[in-house]
Image (cartoon, helix red, strand yellow):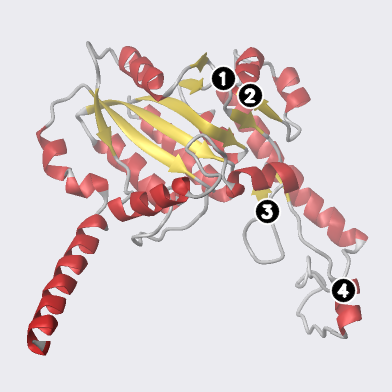
Amino acid sequence: MANKRLAVGIVAGIIFLTLIAAMAIPVDKRNAGKMGAAQDSQVGVIRIEGTITGSTSQGWMTTQGSAGQILEQLRAAQKDTGVKAVVIRVNSPGGSAAAAQEIVEEIQRLRQSGKVVVVSMGDMAASAGYWIAAQADTVVANPTTLTGSIGVIMQWENLEELFKKLGISSEVIKSGAFKDIGSATRPLTEEERELLQGLVDDTYQQFFDDVALRREGKITRERLAQVADGRVFTGRQAKELGLVDELGNFYDAVDKAGALAGIEGEPKLKEYSTETALERFFSGLSSMAPGGGVSDLTRGQWWPLLWKGVFNEPGKSYRVE
């Protein structure tokens, strides 16, 4: 009897591991055969979900905000002769300026290859998410999408007084005056503050100039300067300002992409997402949690709006806002 239970357990374990392995295969690889057999006149779909990071990891639990994955998908769409247009679905509160800039450059290469690019905004396309969205031929948002938040922020905590109360002291040996800049054990010096402000100002100027260029003719540079102060807008407000072109959902964006690319009839969709079934499973569990829901903003999406975001190294932040 014991041997029988052991055998059943082994078989069950093998089946379970097989299912896990199958679920860990990215969607685009599972559908590779179907995609290859499809004709042209397709609209590619690339999804940018969550905080945008510079990660190049391709692990089974990586996020859709990873620049490494997004760049790979954009390059695949560029080379795909069967795809005439691409819809980029952005649902992000922002993230790394450098990661966003890499994605921006690849979107421009995609457009230069002759592909039509349309952005569909989800719950939120703010900060670095808007920087990416501004690259499209047409930007489509829901009336209640939160977007904008054009700006840059650096932020960390000064725990000096707390450390004193706890009896904690810090000793630093450094090679240069600025090597421990942003340390949580002391306040910034005026010289450090000036240096960091220069970094923020330069990054902001790059962000602002690129948006002004991509939205030229839709919003004046002077008007953009008035609203590019970190504030957020609904999709409807953004359309009135000229930051967004049209109001509609994902399928409206698909129809727009098909029309701009000259596709007759209903476009066929080709997903480039590397999201796995396992990731979708855990995502589904999150949406089922108390207070969860597909229309609710996640903590990660609200965080930059409430606290102006913390990103990158522990105790330090440097993000597009």
Give the left or right position of residue 2, taking residue 106 as reference: left
Label 2 packing within 10 angstroms: few (<14), some (14-19), many (20+) = some
Label 1 packing within 10 angstroms: few (<14), some (14-19), many (20+) = some
Q: Earlier in the sequence, mark 4 or mark 1?
A: 1
- Residue flagged by tag 2: what amino acid is it? Thr
Give the left or right position of residue 4, taking residue 282 as reference: left
Single out the mark in the foreground, 3 or 4.
4
Q: Reply above or below: 227 against 74.
A: above
Q: Residue furthest bottom?
A: 2
Q: Earlier in the sequence, mark 3 or mark 4?
A: 4
Q: Earlier in the sequence, mark 2 or mark 3?
A: 2
Q: Nearer the viewer, residue 183 or 107?
A: 183
Looking at the image, do the residues carrying marks 2 and 1 touch, with CB atoms under 8 Å apart? yes
Alpha carbon of mark 3 to alpha carbon of mark 1: how far? 29 Å
Looking at the image, do the residues carrying marks 4 and 1 touch, with CB atoms under 8 Å apart? no
Q: Earlier in the sequence, mark 4 or mark 2?
A: 4
Q: Quadrant of residue 14?
A: bottom left
Q: Secondary structure at mark 4?
A: helix
Query: What residue is pinned by disc 4?
Result: 162
Q: Secondary structure at mark 2?
A: strand
Q: Nearer the viewer, residue 189 or 16?
A: 16
Residue at 36% x, 40% y: name it. Answer: 74
